[in-house]
Amino acid sequence: MKTLITNELFSDFIECRYRGYLKITGASGSKSDLVDVSGRLLEGYHSQAREHLLRAYRDEGKQVCTDVGLSVVLANRYDLAIDVTATDTNVSVRFDALMAAPGNASGSQPFYIPTVFVNNDKVSKEDELRLALCASVLIRWRACRPSFGRILHGSGFRIRKVKLARALEQADKVLEEIRALDERVPFASNVYEWTRHRYGLQLLAYVIHNIIELHIPQMKLSGSMLKLFHYDVGEPTINRLKRRAAELYQGGYEEIKKALLHGKLIHADETHMSTKGSNGYVWVFTSMEDVIYLWSATREGKVAEEFLSGFNGVLVSDFYSAYDSISCAQQKCLIHLIRDLNEDVLKEPFNEEMKTLVHEFAQLLKPIIETIDRFGLKSHFLKKHKVQVTRYYLDPS
C-alpha cells in the first residue's frame, strides 16, 4: 500500500468517500471554513477531555502518561495513556486514550480499552467506526482483543460503552476499500472501455445522480455543467443521456424484477401523478428488500397483470378491483382497510352496527400489532393470536 492510513484519512473516507479519494491522491485542495472551524472545536474539546481524564486518574494515584508510542504503554503497564501513537508499514493511528481494564494482573498481558473523544453530545455511527479503527490496531499489534470500547463525549465528559463486534467488521471493510482505492485510480479514463458515445460513464452517472437523487431540473443542470466543467450540454443531450442510462440499467431492472417474482411477498399500489399538465400513474411493486416503480398513462389493470405474471407468492394490495384478477394468494392491506373503516364510521356516525364492527376489529388488531412491534414478524410469537382471529371470523354476532 502506498498511502499510510491515518485517523484523518479514515474519518474523511467514512464521512465522504470522494474527499477520502482526494486525500489519497494528494488533491484534497484547501479546507472549507466549516471544516476548519470543526477542526478547531475538536482540538479544543480534545484538550479539555485530556485534562479531565488526567486529573481524575492522578487524584486516584494511578500511573498516567501522554504522547508516547503504543510499545511504551504496553511495556510500562500504565493505567491511563493519552495521545498514544501506533505506526507500522500500513497504518499510523493516534489513540485519544487507552484505559487499563480493571483487574489487570501484574504477570499477565495488559488489557487496554480504546477510548475516543467526541465533542458532540450525540454519538454517531462514524464515531463508533473511529473507535473500531483503534481497536483493530490493538488487535493488529497483538496487544489485546477488546470486546468493547469507550467514547467520552459532550460537555459533561460522559462515557459511553460501545460493543465492538459489528463495528470492527464495518471498520475492516472500510480499510479494505481504502486499500483497494489506493491500488487503483477509479476516476482515470482507462478504467472503462472506449465507446462510440461522446460522453463517458462518469458524466452519465453525474447527470443521473443530479436528476434523480438531488432533484435538479434539467435546465439548471445544463447551466451548472457549463459553469463547473465548461461542458455545453443542452437539454436534448441530457435527454439522450437519460435514455442511455435506461438502456444501461435494463439488466439491473430485470434482476430486481426476477427477485420480486421469485419471492414470497409483493406489496403493490398505484397513485396518480401530473407533470406539466400531463396525467399518468406510478405503480410500485416491492418486497421487504427490492422495489420497482413503473409509469403508465392510465390506471388499467394490465400493468399489474403483465408485471405479476408468474408470481406465486402473497400479493398485498388495496381494494382496487384490478388486482382481483391476478391468480395468486392475496391479502388486503390493513392500512387501507383501517382508513376505509374510519371513513365509513365518519360518514355514518349513528350506525351502531358499523361502530361495533370497527371496535371489535380494533380490539383484534391492537395486540397483534403490539406483538409485531416487540418481536417482529416471527411466527413463533404471532401464532398465539390464531385463536382470537378464528373466533372473530366465526362469531355470528
Image (tube, rainbow, N blue to C red):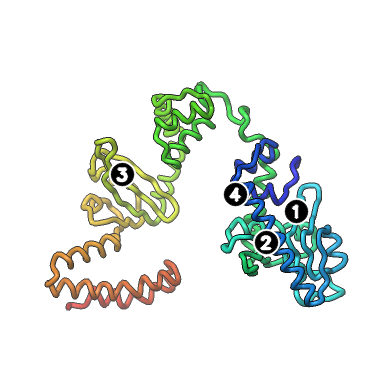
Numbered mark located on residue 15 in the image: 4
Give the CA distance from mark 4 to mark 3: 34 Å
Q: Determine which quarter of the picture holds residue 122.
A: bottom right
- How dense is the environment of label 4, judged by Cα within 10 Å: few (below 14), some, or many (20 and up)? few
Residue 178 position in % (x across, y down): 67, 45
Check disc 3 and report its element: helix, strand or loop.
strand
Give the CA distance from mark 4 to mark 1: 18 Å
Check disc 1 and report its element: helix, strand or loop.
strand
Comes first in the chain, label 4 or label 1: 4
Give the CA distance from mark 1 to mark 2: 14 Å
Amino acid carrying mark 3 in the image: Val
| Residue indicated by mark 2 | 117
**Camera-side residue of 325 and 222:** 222
- Image quarter where the C terminus lies is bottom left
Numbered mark located on residue 282 in the image: 3
Check disc 2 and report its element: helix, strand or loop.
strand
- How dense is the environment of label 3, judged by Cα within 10 Å: few (below 14), some, or many (20 and up)? some
**Camera-side residue of 2 and 247:** 2
Amino acid carrying mark 2 in the image: Phe
Q: Is residue 254 left or right of residue 193?
A: left
Amino acid carrying mark 4 in the image: Glu
| Residue indicated by mark 1 | 93
Comes first in the chain, label 1 or label 3: 1
Residue at image coords 45%, 71%: 375
